[in-house]
């Protein structure tokens, strides 16, 4: 009886254990091998999470480094890269100036014309001069007004002074006909091939499509040159392309081409009305037209006196700076009477170009340096001064006084301020 009772208790205990085991299997639904595998997978997930975090951090750091590098490159572009340019007006070789270059030994030298401004010219990245008079050489005979011709030695002195671009599209381009232009082109090409000579052409192709582009630090500047006419002298029938005329279709074609090649476009037109201190209606209309085309800077010559500087806003959002006339660089006019002294005062245009944060090249600074032609008779004596180096004593010795008694040191200041009071006023 006692044995049967124990046996019964044993069976109850075994049944209880079986039920308990089944419940555990039901809850885990995993074998010991499966449980071990799950533990290992959990460890892998933890490793993956840590790896992802490390990778994300590396990407973040890389992005920061790239951003810094891009910022440094942009800083170099916007802060360190610029172009300083200057331009002077008409080199007008009247008879007295031609004669001033003939030295006592019979040779020709014109270094004196540029001696007092040479430092500024050499300091500029890009220096431009309007060589009003064709350089046909002494073989064609040196001559002054009204049909000019200059010596090749003037070109030597221009090169030594540090000019980079020579403008030749003027109303006096054809004063010595086709021969004068050909002599001039050959002189520049054979003697100073590194200089850019603009406005006159030896071929139709050069007339139609040649665009001069100056480049520094990744900034490209195109320069175009045109004249309103040639004093009634007809273009050679076999060289109708010999000089660039102020033709809207030609300008438009050149500007379109220049936009493909350069970041910034300068036009140097020979235009306006002589001796007028204000721009003509035609100048204003042409300037507005060029602004609409997308030109960035205009520096004009021909009036032989200074004219205002202003900004023009085009309808398409382009903003263009225009110097309507920077006057003469040097001259020895034979004119007499009130107002003739105005021809002695010129301007040296000074402009700094830079690239902004969007990559566009723009005018960062602009100004004008007053210049005065100092007329003196004799070899090597006539010259041009910066007004900052001029004095009342020098002014009293200027031979222009014989032709216009109004000329004085103060006269130059008053004339300058009359034209540039809103831009570059001088104090007396």
Image (cartoon, rainbow, N blue to C red):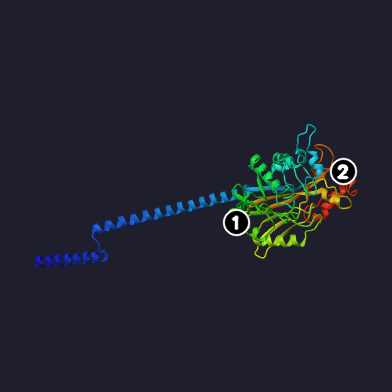
User: How crowded is the residue under tag 1: few (<14 C-alpha within 10 Å), some, or many (20+)?
Assistant: some
Spot the residue most to the top. Answer: 105
**Residue 179 pos. (x, y %):** 69, 46
Q: Is residue 207 left or right of residue 117?
A: left
Instruction: Depth check: give the residue in front, 105 or 292.
Output: 105
- Residue 397: which quarter of the image? top right
Q: Is residue 26 left or right of residue 67?
A: left
Q: Residue at x 20, y 67 (%)?
A: 19
- Residue 114: which quarter of the image? top right
Give the residue number, with chain letter if any, for mark 1: 257
Spot the residue most to the front. Answer: 237
Q: How many marks?
A: 2
Q: Which mark is residue 399?
A: 2
Q: CA distance from mark 2 to mark 1?
A: 47 Å
Q: Secondary structure at mark 2?
A: helix
Q: Residue at x 17, y 65 (%)?
A: 13
Instruction: Depth check: give the residue in front, 31 or 364.
Output: 364
**Residue 309 pos. (x, y %):** 75, 56
**Residue 325 pos. (x, y %):** 76, 54
Q: Is residue 53 left or right of residue 219?
A: left
**Residue 140 pos. (x, y %):** 74, 42
Q: Secondary structure at mark 1?
A: helix
Identify the mark nearer the N-term, 2 or 1. 1
Instruction: Depth check: give the residue in front, 143 or 293.
Output: 143
Q: Which mark is residue 7?
A: none
User: How crowded is the residue under tag 2: few (<14 C-alpha within 10 Å), some, or many (20+)?
Assistant: some
């Amino acid at each position: 009886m006692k044995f049967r009772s124990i046996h019964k208790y044993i069976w109850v205990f075994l049944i209880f254990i079986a039920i308990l085991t089944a419940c555990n299997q039901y809850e885990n639904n995993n074998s010991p091998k499966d449980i071990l595998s799950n533990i290992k997978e959990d460890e892998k997930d933890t490793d993956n999470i840590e790896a992802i975090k490390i990778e994300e951090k590396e990407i973040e750091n890389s992005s920061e480094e790239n951003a810094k590098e891009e910022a440094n490159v942009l800083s170099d572009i916007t802060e360190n890269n610029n172009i300083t340019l200057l331009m002077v007006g008409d080199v007008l070789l009247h008879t007295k100036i031609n004669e001033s270059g003939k030295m006592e030994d019979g040779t020709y030298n014109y270094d004196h014309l540029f001696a007092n401004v040479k430092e500024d010219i050499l300091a500029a990245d890009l220096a431009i001069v309007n060589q009003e008079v064709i350089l046909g050489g002494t073989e064609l005979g040196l001559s002054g007004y009204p049909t000019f011709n200059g010596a090749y030695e003037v070109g030597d002195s221009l090169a030594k002074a540090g000019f980079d671009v020579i403008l030749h599209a003027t109303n006096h381009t054809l004063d010595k006909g086709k021969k004068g232009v050909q002599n001039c082109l050959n002189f520049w090409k054979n003697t100073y091939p590194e200089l850019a000579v603009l406005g006159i052409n030896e071929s139709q192709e050069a007339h139609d499509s040649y665009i001069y582009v100056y480049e520094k630090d990744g900034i490209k500047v195109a320069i175009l040159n045109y004249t309103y006419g040639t004093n009634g002298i007809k273009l050679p029938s076999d060289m109708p392309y010999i000089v660039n005329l102020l033709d809207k279709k030609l300008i438009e074609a050149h500007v379109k081409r220049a936009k493909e090649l350069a970041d910034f476009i300068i036009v140097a037109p020979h235009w306006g009305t002589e001796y007028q201190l204000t721009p003509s209606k035609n100048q204003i209309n042409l300037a507005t037209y060029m602004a609409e085309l997308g030109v960035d800077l205009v520096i004009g010559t021909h009036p032989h006196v200074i004219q205002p500087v202003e900004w023009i806003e085009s309808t398409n959002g382009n903003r263009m700076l225009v110097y309507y006339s920077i006057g003469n660089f040097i001259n020895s006019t034979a004119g007499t009477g009130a107002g003739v002294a105005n021809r002695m005062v010129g301007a040296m245009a000074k402009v700094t170009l830079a690239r902004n944060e969007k990559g566009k090249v723009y005018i960062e600074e602009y100004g004008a340096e007053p210049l005065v032609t100092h007329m003196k008779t004799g070899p090597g004596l006539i010259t041009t001064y910066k007004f900052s180096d001029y004095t009342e004593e020098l002014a009293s010795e200027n031979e222009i006084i014989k032709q216009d008694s109004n000329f004085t040191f103060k006269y130059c200041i008053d004339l300058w301020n009359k034209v540039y009071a809103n831009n570059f006023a001088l104090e007396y």
